[in-house]
Structure formats: C-alpha cells, structure tokens
Amino acid sequence: MKKFLIFTLLLCLMTAFFVPFSGAAFAESTVEGVKSYYLVDYDSGTVLSKYNESERRPIASMVKIMTLCLTFKAIEEGKLDVNQKLLISETASGMGGSQMFLDANKEYAVKDLIKGVVVCSANDAAVALGEAISGSIEGFVSDMNAYAKELGMSDTLFCNTTGLPGGEQFSTARDVSIMTRKLLSYKNYYEYSKIWIEDYIHPDGRKTEMVNTNKLIRFYQGCDAGKTGFTNDAMFCLSASAMRKDMRVIATVLGGADSKTRFRKVSELFNFAFANYEQKVIFKAGESITHNLKIAKSKQTEVDVYSSGDLKIFSKKGEKVSANVKIMLKDGLKAPLQADTVIGKAEVYDAEGKLKAITDLCLRHDVCKQNLFDAMRFVLKSWSLKK
C-alpha cells in the first residue's frame, strides 16, 4: 500500500486527576505466594509489572489457551465451523481429569466443545478439537508449537493439548500472556468466556453442569476472560483479562501457593493497573475522521471516512501526552466504491515517534461513479467559480 499523508493531528491529552505511581511497594507485595507473574496492557503491549516472567514452568491446563487459539484460527480461516458436528473418538472420550463427559462415537457441535474447554477446562473436548483440526493429537501438538514460535513465544514447549502431566511441557508468565493476548483478539471467544455456570444437555439427554474455573468472572468487576491451571508440579496458575472504561489488561500468575492466592494476586495486579494507568481515546470506533476526502471519478464532492476501531494511547494517569495521528490512503482509489470499504489506515505515534496504535479507515457511504452529466456539471461549476 502506497501511503499518502492526508493530515497530521497533534493532540495534547491530560487527565484531571493524578494518581501517584507506587510500583516498588506493589511489586514487593505481589511476589509473596507466587513463582512468577506478568502484567501487560492489551492494546499497546506495554508491560506494567513483572517478576520472574521468563522462568520456565509447567502451566497445567493453561496449555488450552493455545488449543483455543488454534481453534478460533481454524474457524476464522474457514477450516472449521462452530455449528459443525464432530464425531468423538475413544481417545477423546477417555481423557481423564476435568471433562464434560463426552460420549465416544457420538457427534457434538464445535461450539459446544469450545464452551466445554473455556468454561470447565474439559480435556475430552480439547482433544476432540485438536483431532478435528490437525487430524491427530501429534499433528495438533506440532501445530501448537509452530504457532507459539510464530507468536514470539520463545520459552514454550507443548507436548499435549490438555496440560495433563506426561512429557516435557513448559512456558513462562510472559509467553502465556502472549497467547492470552492472541486469544482475546478473537471476538467470538467472549461469547463463551463470560459464562459463569450452565447446564449442558448431551445428545442423549444427559446433563452436565459446567462451572467456570475462573472465579474472577463473577467476583472481579470487569473480568470477562481467563484460564486457570493446576497440577502438583505447576501449582495454581491463572491468566486472566479485565476491562474498565477503555482499558483492557492481562495478568498472568504462575505457581500460586493455593487457589485463593492466584485469584488474589491477579486481582491485585488488575487493581494496580486500573489505579495507575489509562487509555486516552483519540477516536472511537465508528467516529468520523474526515468528511472532505475526495475520491477520483466520484459523483460526491466530499466523502465521509470513519475509524473501524478505537484509536487510543496508553499512559500513566495524570501524565501529559502528545499524540501524532497520521492518516493514510491506499494508492489508486477511484469510484465506484461500496460503503465500509477499507481505503486506508490511521496510525498514532507518541512524542518520541513510536507507533502506539493503528486502525483501518472505511467509507461511511457508497461512493458512486460520476456519469457524463456529472462531469459536465463539475466543469461548468468550476468555470463559473473562476469568473
């Protein structure tokens, strides 16, 4: 895409109230009871707090975060459909640990298997999805490791799709946060992650009660996503996300001493983030960025362009921020064009010139091609204005 600068917008944003930064005291208090943790802003990727974030550790059922990433990726690519029925193998049905008690040789919808993995960490559903996507668990594990490398997870190795003990398998608080961030980018994930409790009815009429293993879904304001994990080696783990106002953060805790500790530590990390940081919104999704764009051969003299996503810049509360917004168009744009066509992008840079956010630019309405009479009318209007 050849870039054409339409305009550069300089913004100075400042909040009305200042909340003092207290990172040192916070970091000291959160080390107790956990082996490592990582706190990151979802939109910008800014690291807010960390401890032993690169220490390799078993992560138990948080392995299923990657299982879900590959599942939603397959759906996005059209290789799998949420309404598609999958035949459950003996291997999947026979998995131990947490499960939704699938019947072997019976068909279950993909969306129900996803729900089982997300809500109650069902091992049987995770295996069924892996077999469907890659043809075998061995193939799926290979795909998991390949995708981990693609995402930049340099300290992660998977050996199964469930997180159950057996074989070499490890990750880090940083790497788990990376794959959680990727999972959160799939909007359909939130249809399942917000479920607290549900009775699932099997094809034969049996009922399985599914309760979300992430208790913060119910007990922490703004928490709408997350995955727990526990084995004797991994201890108590959690990677979760919460959103308040316009800011979403991800907190990952590995090696918690007990279940209460992991939920308490993640809650503390959330509290720290929301007390000390914020996202300053420059343009909201759907907001008009310019009304006077001209398109070649267009019948309209001016065209309305809107932002497809929020344009935000991350900062400490009370901190003055300068934002440089660059609006760029694709090369060779000309009518006719349909409404919602992506015609360019907007980028936000901080005062140091670092790219902080990016979003697509779209047409608000159809752009009609001018006919002969439109062209003549334009020429006559231009001629009259020159007189």
Image (cartoon, rainbow, N blue to C red):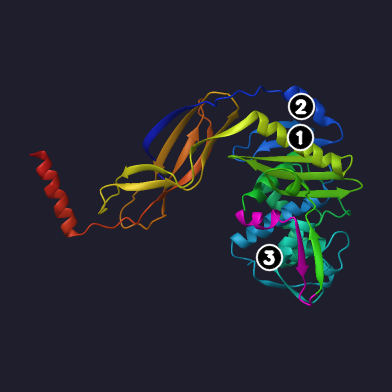
Q: Does the magenta segment cover residue 204?
A: yes
User: Cβ–Cβ below 8 Å for labels 2 and 1?
Assistant: yes
User: SS for tag 1?
Assistant: helix
Q: Can residue 153 be spotted in the picture?
A: no
Mark 3, other Cα within 10 Å: few <14 / some 14–19 / many ≥20: some
Q: Does the magenta segment cover residue 147?
A: no
Q: How many marks?
A: 3
Q: Position of residue 339 (x, y in %)?
A: 38, 56
Provide the residue span drawn in magenta: 187-205
For label 1, the residue is 268
For label 3, the residue is 111
State which tag comes first along the sequence, 1 or 3.
3
Q: Position of residue 137 (x, y in %)?
A: 78, 63
Query: Which of the pair 149/263 is nearer the observer?
Result: 263
For label 2, the residue is 26
Under mark 1, the amino acid is Glu
State which tag comes first along the sequence, 2 or 1.
2
User: Cβ–Cβ below 8 Å for labels 3 and 2?
Assistant: no
